[in-house]
Amino acid sequence: METQQSIEALVERVLPKIVRIRQAIHQNPELALQEHVTSALIRATLGSAGVRTLKPFLRTDVVAMMTGRGEGRNVTLRADTDALPLQEKTGLPYQSNRDGIMHACGHDGHTAAVLGAALVLNGLKDHFDGSVRFVFQPGEEVMAAGRDLVEKGALLDPTPSAVLALHAWSGLPEGAIASKPGIMMAAADFFQVTILGKGAHGSMPEVSIDPILGAARVVEALQSVASRRVSALEPVVISVCRVCGGTNSNIIPDTAELEGTTRYLDPETGKEIPALMEQAIRGACDTIGASYEFSYAKKYIPTINDEEVVAVGRKVTQKVLGPASWIELDRPAMGGEDFSFYITEYPGAMFRLGMGEASPALHTPRFDFNDNALKPAVMFLVSATMEFLRR
């Protein structure tokens, strides 16, 4: 039977390779559903180790299967592979070489960690029964492609007994593992508003229906939905994240556009939000005589962790990484994750991986996945997988 020391030795052996892979992925980021170079690198790495990969379900995904010495349970490890449309400002030697695209959410590290786990578990196949599935998923950001991957059968034959994922997290101690049972992350919806006005010369606003003014009033009105139309006991976030209107400093345009996101924990509350938002938008537009177009898309459901899976993750972390490496979270985050679709029918949990207390925040131009967290990440994934396969 494998020991913690033998696992650690295998992790140390693959660590330099997965650090190089992580930095190569960081340097060559690709947006959602365009991860061709990344998926080719993943397939080449797994193929060179003799790990079987399946035909793509969504073109740029990679799903691999590994079987042990006999029949048993299945554990599925999931990583996401896409980057964000953001200009990197880290100045690192391996900084993104693609203008306006960077790995600002740690997906490069998630991919490297699961690849590392695959390489280590490949050396332990004679020590476990059952199978391990490795899912490298495209399009987590905004696209919620995890839903499509699950719908297309990526988790079938065999179905998993446990599904695990790590997510880089700024502000947590370097290499720490954190989670909680129950709701871990919020639902995430997305909206678009187009204010339809009437353009004019900038010196003659009286003959216009100014969509810029309308957009400003809509932004303000939407804040009242969360603060005045929903119970203060229900966490709800409505954020306008993009405002676009006009072409020149002396032209009042015909239209202005807003885009944003809403977040909530309670699905019943989520059902009410679109109608409440449209009431606020209509009222704001009516005050200036503008009309509007409003679209609303429900993309991500809440991520709800299985209690037993979290308990095993806690036990493994404390045993393998030390008691101080486990952090029990007391509240969910309002971020959304399409990992939620993996664990609606199968037991599973998402765990946070500490990037360090001083790490720049996720989704900012100076974020970089902390390579020092890769060893504890791989140790956790491998040890938790072995524990679930034994149970």
Image: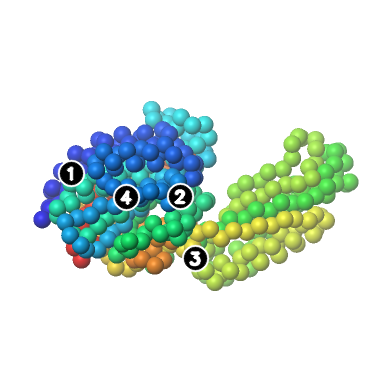
Q: Does residue 104 appear left or right of residue 268 in this picture?
A: left
> Observer-nearest residue: 225 or 351?
351
Dot 4 falls on a residue whose secondary structure is strand
Nearer the observer: mark 3 or 1; the answer is: 1
* Residue 131 in view: yes
Q: Real-space Cα distance between discs 4 and 2?
A: 14 Å
Say which quarter of the image contains residue 157: bottom left
| Residue 58: mark in rendering | 2
Spatial distance from mark 1 to mark 4, Cα to Cα?
A: 20 Å
Please tell me in which quadrant of the rendered image residue 387 appears.
bottom left
What amino acid type should be assigned to the residue bearing mark 2? Leu
Q: Of circles 2 and 3, which is in front?
A: 2
Q: Inspect the image, locate mark 4, and give the three-letter code of the amino acid beneath it.
A: Ala
**Circle 1 SS class:** helix
Contact? badges 1 and 2 (CB < 8 Å): no
Give the x, y percent position of residue 328: 32, 61
Per the model, the C-alpha gap separating discs 3 and 4 is 33 Å
Disc assigned to residue 222 = none
How busy is the neighbourhood of tag 1: few (under 14 within 10 Å), some, or many (20 plus)?
some
Mark 1, residue position: 10
- Nearer mark to the viewer, of 1 and 2: 2
Q: Secondary structure at mark 3?
A: loop
Could you tell which of marks 2 and 3 lies nearer the N-terminus? 2
Cβ–Cβ below 8 Å for labels 3 and 4? no
Mark 3 = which residue? 265
Residue 124, percent across and down? 17, 50
Closer to the chain start, of discs 3 and 1, is: 1
Q: Nearer the viewer, mark 1 or mark 4?
A: 4
**For the residue marked with disc 1, what is the amino acid?**
Leu
